[in-house]
Image (cartoon, grey):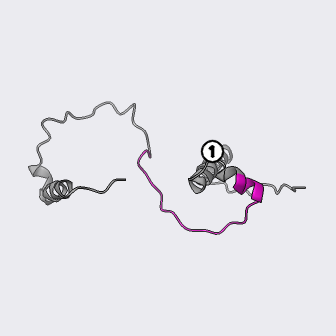
Amino acid sequence: MRKLTKEQKRDLQAIAAKRDRDIDFSDAPPVLDWSGAEIGKFYRPAKKPVTMRLDSDIIDWLKADGRGYQTKANWLLRHAMLYFTKRNGLNKRKRAPRVAHP
């Protein structure tokens, strides 16, 4: 995200200082149809640093596209979490069977 200019910071401070009832919304029509809304589009969960031991070929694959391998790993894990959560029910926490690797 780019840094805000001095003018943008000044404008934000002026808006923040206003009371809700003093803001003019007449040029912004109310949204009545929310069918196209995307849930969680701007939600960013808090990140926590962790240490994981992964197979070297997995790390090589994640890093093959260049920068952003941690984001890629997070994306893959999130999709797996959502898949298994949906499949097994939200409140059922089942341990996945361990798979032996050669």
Q: Quadrant of the rendered structure where residue 83 is? A: top right
Mark 1 nearby-residue class (10 Å; few <14, some 14–19, many ≥20): few
Q: Nearer the viewer, residue 35 or 6?
A: 6
Tell whether position 45 is magenta. yes
Tag count in the figure? 1
* Magenta stretch: helix, strand or loop mostly: loop
> Going by the picture, which residue comes out furthest to the left?
22
Q: Quadrant of the C terminus?
A: bottom right
Q: Quadrant of the rendered structure where residue 17 is? A: bottom left
Residue lying at 12% horizontally and 37% vertically, measured from the top left: 26
Tell whether position 53 is magenta. yes
> Going by the picture, which residue comes out furthest to the right?
102
Q: Which residue matches tag 1?
A: 86
Coordinates of residue 47 in the picture (x, y in percent): 51, 63
Q: Nearer the viewer, residue 31 or 15?
A: 15
Q: Nearer the viewer, residue 69 or 12?
A: 69
From the viewer's perspective, tell me whether residue 69 is left or right of residue 95.
left
From the viewer's perspective, tell me whether residue 9 is left or right of residue 97.
left
Q: Nearer the viewer, residue 38 or 9?
A: 9
Residue 18 in the image: above or below residue 49? above
Residue lying at 20% horizontally and 33% vertically, measured from the top left: 29
Which amino acid type is shown beneath numbered disc 1? Lys
Coordinates of residue 2 in the picture (x, y in percent): 33, 53
From the viewer's perspective, tell me whether residue 2 is left or right of residue 71.
left
Coordinates of residue 12 in the picture (x, y in percent): 19, 56
Coordinates of residue 31 in the picture (x, y in percent): 27, 34
Q: Which residues are magenta?
A: 40-60
Residue lying at 37% horizontally and 53% vertically, measured from the top left: 1
Residue 62 in the image: above or below residue 25? below
> In the structure shown, which secondary structural element does the residue marked by tag 1 occupy?
helix
